[in-house]
Amino acid sequence: MMDQLSPPVDRLAYIGRDVSLAQPGEKLSVFVDRANAVGGLVRDGFLSATAVSEKLWQTARAHNLVGSPGSELEEHITNVIEGAVALADEDEPPMPAGPDDYGGHSASTAPSDQSPLALVTPQQWKGVELEPMRWLATHRVPADDVTILSGDGGLGKTTVALQLGVSVARNLGDWLGTTTLSGPVIFFSAEEPESEMRRRLDRVARKRGIEPEQIEHLYFHFAEPDKALLGISTPAGTIAPTATFQALARSVTDVRPALLIVDSVAAVFGGNQNDRVQARTFVSMFRRLAREAGCAIVLLDHPSLSGMNSGTGRGGNMDWSNVVRSRLYLRTVEEEEAAFRELEVVKSNYGPAGEKVRLRWEDGSFVLKTVQSTPQQAATFAKIDDLFLKLLDKRTAQGRRVYPTKGSGYAPSVFAIDPDAAGITPKALATSMERLFSERKIVTIEEGPPSKRVTRIARAEVSKDG
């Protein structure tokens, strides 16, 4: 990649090389970054605007970054190149001589028409019921916010996300060892073509014992390359929503999904991934959409080289991680017998971080990696599973609900203190609960008004009867 100490002419020559070396989904981001870099050399007088413009257009066309005539992508590339070769005295104001030149006011003269900030005190919360934390996927994906799922290309993050979408849309209640809410799902795909997604969905659905056509509330959009950008850079250095984002937002308003999946950041972000302001404004677009629509949003992303080497899975600068409330990382783990995947919760503002689950590939999907049990272990597991179901039936008959998330009414903790538990520990019952979810012997049911939804556990065969 371009060395900051390289001669100006060499740095111009490196643009095409750097874009060529970038992953397919990252070429646009690398192009924007390199254009911004050589733009500084134009303004400093080291390179001519004409030479830089010609080189940038040559590179953009060579790597199919321009799009069709009149498309948003062509407009974006035009803005990037024009911004790179613009001279400072043409589009930049003179340096400010004092505070008044910033257009602001001194501390002693606040503007008369400016309203004060809206302030709130804890006394105003008295008597207002505290809303419970809502998770789309317990302790992994918050229900009304943005989560980034990162992983190197080819590791299977699209399939992992698709498995989550199927679980939510089909009300299966579980996803790779955790519980999920249910509701419609929108999957915005800017990387995988429709034919490939159909093959993946077929494998994922059949692994769960269902036909793809039975998943009525899973909606896909396959974006054309020149209409995939959801946010593009502005002259002010921020990210602005595109017409495609506005159309997506209208679809979210119409469908009211529980989950929106966007695959991937590299294909839909038309800015510089290393720019902290652009990273924040881009994610903020989705956070606003998540809160307005009441849905979880999962953005799939590729980690940077430093993110892979450090094991953090970060892409771009730190603000990609800082601005989201939850971040998951899918990596490869080498073991003696084979290579597995590991899904880690590397950040969670609302719950415990550090959870790691080992996954193995089976019949076109990921499943939890478990050690094969002996006949004696299998018999013990079956006994505990039967006990879990017996205690669930007992509580249901008493009209006393139990829940899959830790807190008041957490099923394993409640069952462990029951007189019929015979000393079985909460940990063993929690493991049993995950087995029963995976085997679809138990499911989750949402209850309550829209603003106070809670999720309880029920037997699968009686879930429709409540």
Image (cartoon, grey):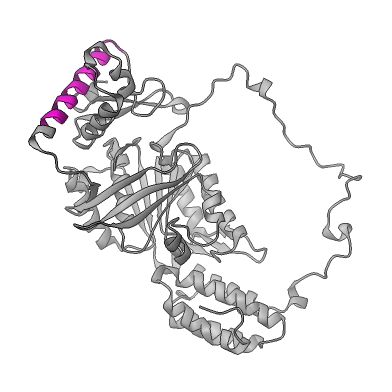
Instruction: Locate residue 14, reporting x and y percent.
Output: 52, 84
Instruction: Report the magenta stretch's main SS.
Output: helix
Q: Quadrant of residue 134?
A: top left
Instruction: Locate residue 214, reporting x and y percent.
Output: 21, 43
Q: Nearer the viewer, residue 354 or 441?
A: 354
Q: Residue placed at 59% from the left, 73% from the top?
A: 80
Q: Nearer the viewer, residue 74 or 333?
A: 333
The quarter of the picture where the C terminus appears is top left
Question: On the picture, is 3 further left or further right than 328?
Answer: right
Instruction: Locate residue 128, reporting x and y percent.
Output: 58, 20
State the residue lying farthest toward the front: 336
Residue 253 in sight: yes
Question: On the picture, is 297 further left or further right than 43?
Answer: left
Considering only vertical position in the picture, is 31 above or below 277?
A: below
Q: Residue placed at 74% from the left, 76% from the top?
A: 88
Q: Is residue 226 magenta?
A: no
Q: Residue placed at 62% from the left, 64% from the top?
A: 234
Residue 228 in sight: no
Question: On the picture, is 454 further left or further right than 386?
Answer: right
Q: Nearer the viewer, residue 150 or 113?
A: 150
Q: Is residue 394 magenta?
A: yes
Instruction: Locate residue 337, reporting x and y percent.
Output: 19, 57
Magenta span:
379-399
For the image, the number of numbered tags is 0
Considering only vertical position in the picture, is 149 above or below 65?
A: above
State the residue lying farthest toward the left: 375
